[in-house]
Image (tube, coloured by chain):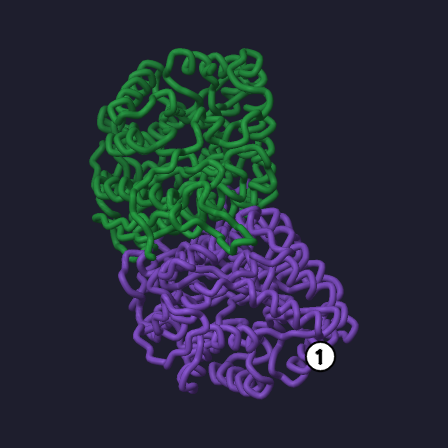
Chain colours: A purple, B green
Amino acid sequence: MTRRLLLGAFLFHPGGAHVTGWRHESAEPDRHLDIDFFADFARTAERGVFDTLFFADGLYFWDRFTSGIDHYSQVRPEPLTLLAALSVRAKNIGLAATISTTYNEPYHVARALASLDHISGGRAAWNLVTSRYDEEARNFGGDSHLDHSRRYERGAEFVEVVNKLWDSWADDAILADKASGFFADNTKLQTPDHRGEFFTVRGPLNITRGPQGHPVLFQAGGSPAGQELAAATADAVFTHFPSLEEAKRFYAGLKKQVVEHGRDPERFSILPTLRPVVGRSRAEAEDLAEQILATTPDSLIVEDVSHSIGQDLTGRSADERFAFAPNVDVSNESKSPNKRREWAGQSEQVTARELYARSFRENVVIGTGIEIADIVEERFTEFAADGFMVQSLTVPSGLENFVDEVIPELQRRGLTRTAYEETTLRERFGLERAPRADYAQTVAG
Amino acid sequence: MTRRLLLGAFLFHPGGAHVTGWRHESAEPDRHLDIDFFADFARTAERGVFDTLFFADGLYFWDRFTSGIDHYSQVRPEPLTLLAALSVRAKNIGLAATISTTYNEPYHVARALASLDHISGGRAAWNLVTSRYDEEARNFGGDSHLDHSRRYERGAEFVEVVNKLWDSWADDAILADKASGFFADNTKLQTPDHRGEFFTVRGPLNITRGPQGHPVLFQAGGSPAGQELAAATADAVFTHFPSLEEAKRFYAGLKKQVVEHGRDPERFSILPTLRPVVGRSRAEAEDLAEQILATTPDSLIVEDVSHSIGQDLTGRSADERFAFAPNVDVSNESKSPNKRREWAGQSEQVTARELYARSFRENVVIGTGIEIADIVEERFTEFAADGFMVQSLTVPSGLENFVDEVIPELQRRGLTRTAYEETTLRERFGLERAPRADYAQTVAG
């Protein structure tokens, strides 16, 4: 099998990956709850022959600072309903839903994803997250969030239960035989009867395995606990976009972890996020990046930086110099590298705007279609990536520019395909239909 | 406003309301997880200008008896993903999802239903159930089911929280003003900050009110606790189909309860379930009913009766006479009238087949299109019903026959409409867009 570069169209917010991308001239912030807006996005991604849609999600509204309400486009449809509707509007692309293991029940999640897999003809995927913010805990009966390590323990057991539920029915269990009156063969149904630390779930699931057997499982690979869970269970990981050398180290390290779990590293994809800013010339792209950065009001810059470095700067100007003296514990939110915090700690004095602009620039790739294709190709051929999660800073223009300027160049180089060939998302990811595990529990009777 | 008869196309199982309806010659049991199968059903309902689809659901697989696995078509898609996909395939009909308040979190439910309402352009509805079986408890960490009265207390608080979450955003809160950079007006957002007996939910919701404000709320009106919750909160109730006199008493009593809650009884619809068996002649309809009844294997008759009367008859013949001596407590499952239990208690000796056949006949309406239209008209004009939840015993033939034979007669009599006029489901139910409650909590900042 030729190695082929995988592409996800990652929608961070309906307004784009930049927090105020909704202010860009191409943006349509009035349409963030309009199914046609998302169908347009999906069809643009299909024009670029992307493998999957990938919608971020959160179970909260970030209102700890007023600027979050004032300036941030956080309102969005619920992922499963949205993707189910899109499965009818876009007939080829994968459909990845972000679902938290901390605030859900395995039975609901197994069922909804199996249903999406049936409805979409085998295009369902699950982006497993453990949630990160106290805002989320407070919407589900808690005050503060479950500890980071406990979240991952719960996540690991959650995946185990969901996999068992998905495997309730053998693929030939349903007989639907009108003549004999046998709808199912009861010897081909198994009940998980799971009793673990976090979950007690008897089963069986009331839906059979979908076209993929199991939907594709994505996870973020930021923290050591996340990497460990991903190496043990995921089909693909997305991660941030560091330097080529860092990315190669990460890639080799994680593939090694996958092998240590007795799994095939060629059946495990590593997809760094890519935030392209594309111009017809380098100067045009640089200008565009500056324009996008400039959309963020100062109050949001100050409060976003406050949150990420764990130091309340509210009321200061974005240009006021301050010494790093964290006074809010944000360490439980994420164990991924926190660059702004690192930089703030390295300087004697810094401004919120400097930190904000630096992290913006660190996370984007600015250039012409050919320049960005060069970077993509280098990362792919040097085994720093198996593909990319393309996060458009602005919607729809960011994705459109990528599809118009970068994709043709990648296609010309034979890195990405020019038409959909496989039917299921697993096939596109080089994965067989998931085999069914036999957990040797028989049902009543 | 002329009073107009409301119609729901109630899908009990994908195989129909009769437990083995999937064996009927018209049935397509191989397609029970195929989106096209449900789209065909939705389009047939739209051909009959039904107001809403209405899909029953359960969070379990009934396997306490082997016959449940062997003969019963319980496998089905998850309702929210199914209805979201159908919203694209059928552009007019309402979309009612059955969701349990016992095994869900208000934040998820509020969000998913608001999302479905946006996606469908104002056609979302919620059939609130509290779940009834131990099988469901065991899929969500429990061994046995929450007590009936506690289920309804939890249900009442659940609705309160969901309503508050739906009202997080004023309808003019989203500014999406690119020039000023204000996405929302923070004075028009309120946080529920709910702290009750069952739920602690801060909010706000991360989605705005849909076209309907609140989706239409359906509930079953079987038990006194269910009737009380419905009178206080629901927009419409469905119930079983007793004699005309019983139905009139029920109708008057429940409307009175609605008034006692300070609500408008004309804005509250009572929709008995109707299980039509339609023939071109009375004899043909009677034959069809017998054919459908005969699809049920004896083992399922014995075990279904065992479950409903709470007496384990496993191993007996369906024709063996027995005295009623209940030995299984099923009283917590439902407080709706249990006719089979009543009949078994009234006879000295009875057979499972007799009980099964009697309840089958009690729950169906057999006749020609004109005969069934006569019953429908009588119930409607005598204020025993505001409309009907039509449960086809077999799918698709049951619904097709109703649309072909009964609907034209109802239309001819001016009882039902011949085309869709209103946009939202609330409008069809004579309801205004739900006003937003102000609960006077301000957000951070």
The residue singled out by tag 1 in the image is: A374
Tell me if residue A20 comes above or below residue B108 in the rendering.
below
Structural crowding at the residue carrying mark 1, measured as other residues with C-alpha within 10 Å and reported as few (<14), some (14–19) or many (≥20)? some
Give the quadrant of residue B154.
top left
Report the chain holding disc 1: A
| Residue ID at (55%, 62%) | A295
Quadrant where the image shows the N terminus of chain A: bottom right
Tell me if residue A167 comes above or below residue B400 in the rendering.
below
In the rendered structure, which amino acid carries the disc numbered 1?
Answer: Asp
**Residue nearer the viewer, B343 or B208:** B208
**Residue nearer the viewer, A319 or B25:** A319
| Residue ID at (28%, 56%) | A141
Question: Which percent across, then down, holds residue A387?
Answer: 63, 74
Question: Which percent across, then down, holds residue B153?
Answer: 23, 41
**Residue nearer the viewer, B315 or B133:** B133
**Residue B378 horizontal side relative to residue B324, left or right:** right
